[in-house]
Amino acid sequence: MKKCSVCKNRYPIEEYRKDSSRKDGLHTTCNKCNSEIQRRWYLKNKEKAKKKANETYNLNKDKISFKRKLDRKLNPDKYKQAAKKRYNPLKSKEYSWKNAGIVDMSIERYNELLDKQNHKCAICTEPSINFKKALAVDHNHKTGKVRGILCDNCNRALGYLKESEEIIINLLNYVKCHKEPIM
């Protein structure tokens, strides 16, 4: 047991960090008090702390990188769990829409469009619950403006038809021309 120089409480030796400059080899403050002292110092000296951390990182970049890669290899589950905690599917969707050049799209707007379309594909009118994938945001690739919400098949079909009215009309005429009579 050892007495903390700040809070004056007695704690087991495990509650103190090592300090080779001390006779007993332990720091004078307990871990809890030490954390509080460091937190207050950091709040007063954020810029200085960040600068020092960057300098230390730059000096030891290769070592740190190697240790991180090794830790990732040895503890893959730890990193998978951490990634799952950080993953936000809504932010991910908004990010992918932005990268696709879709202008003014948010989860709120997506839900509004979905409600407006009665949770159905704007082309085939199939309900969204019949699909494994979420309905896609269809947009004009030149302007980035949203046209509607489509199922994956209709969205791909529109892409394969190059969004060309002429090709779509030709396709429609082709289907009408080769339509089998119903018996």
Image (cartoon, grey):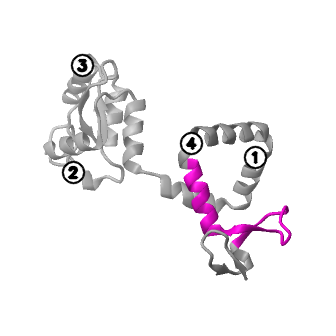
Reading the image, the residue beneath label 2 is 127
Please give left or right for residue 179 compared with residue 48 in the image: left
Q: Which residue is drawn at 33% across and 29% down?
A: 102
Which stretch appears magenta? 16-42
Q: Residue at x 60, y 68 (%)?
A: 32
- Give the CA distance from mark 2 to mark 1: 51 Å
Reading the image, the residue beneath label 4 is 46
Label 1, residues with CA under 10 Å away: few <14, some 14-19, many ≥20: few
Please give left or right for residue 26 compared with residue 130 in the image: right
Report how many numbered discs are placed on residues in the image: 4
Marked residue nearer the N-terminal end (3 or 2): 2
Marked residue nearer the N-terminal end (2 or 1): 1
Residue 165 is tagged as: 3
Give the amino acid at mark 2: Pro
Give the amino acid at mark 3: Glu
Q: Which of 158 and 65 is in front in this view?
A: 65
User: Do callouts 2 and 4 mark residues in contact (Cβ within 8 Å)?
Assistant: no
Q: Nearer the viewer, residue 63 or 8?
A: 8
